[in-house]
Amino acid sequence: MLAAAALLLTACIPDLVADAGPDQVVNEGASVTVRASANVLDHIVNYKWVQTAGPKVNFKVSKKGVLTFTAPETEVQQKITFELTVMYERGHKSKADTVDITVNQIRFFGTAAGSAQ
């Protein structure tokens, strides 16, 4: 009887899908904000963000799932990838979604072509 109730409860829950938002292109040193969302907004317990690629950055996540960090300085274009999973009551979790943040270099080092040495 208990197994049947658990099966019925699982059947009533829609597929839980996280949305890490659109990919972004930013300049080095920029403040970056990524807003989490999901297809089911009721009973969210936690937003879990994990950096999966790119140069390591220190990021913060608010209780509402907003991820923020400062884009690192870079000598070449870099891509930073984050994965979002939304955790719900009773141990349910969403399918993961990823977002790519492309960081462009804005400071150029060395001498300009044709400049006096």
Image: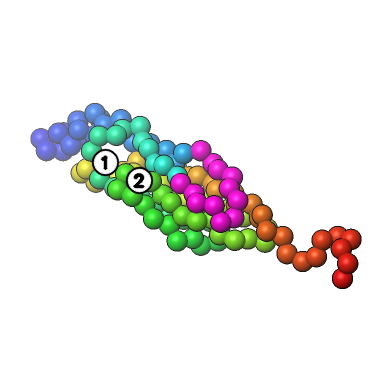
Q: In which quadrant of the rendered view does residue 43 lie?
A: top left
Q: Position of residue 11 (x, y in %)?
A: 25, 30
Residue identified by numbered label 1:
44
Q: Amino acid at mark 2?
A: Gly
Q: Would residue 117 appear left or right of 67 to someone viewing this image?
A: right
Is residue 30 shown in magenta? yes
Q: Would residue 110 appear left or right of 67 to someone viewing this image?
A: right
Quadrant for the N terminus, please.
top left
Q: Earlier in the sequence, mark 2 or mark 1?
A: 1
Q: Is mark 2 in CB contact (under 8 Å) with mark 1?
A: yes
Q: Is residue 38 visible?
A: yes
Residue drawn 80% across the image and 65% down it: 111
Residue drawn 56% across the image and 59% down it: 72
Q: Residues within 10 Å of mark 2 (few under 14, many from 20)?
A: some
Q: Position of residue 76 (x, y in %)?
A: 68, 58
Q: What is the span of residues highlighted in magenta in the rendered image? A: 22-33
Residue identified by numbered label 2:
65
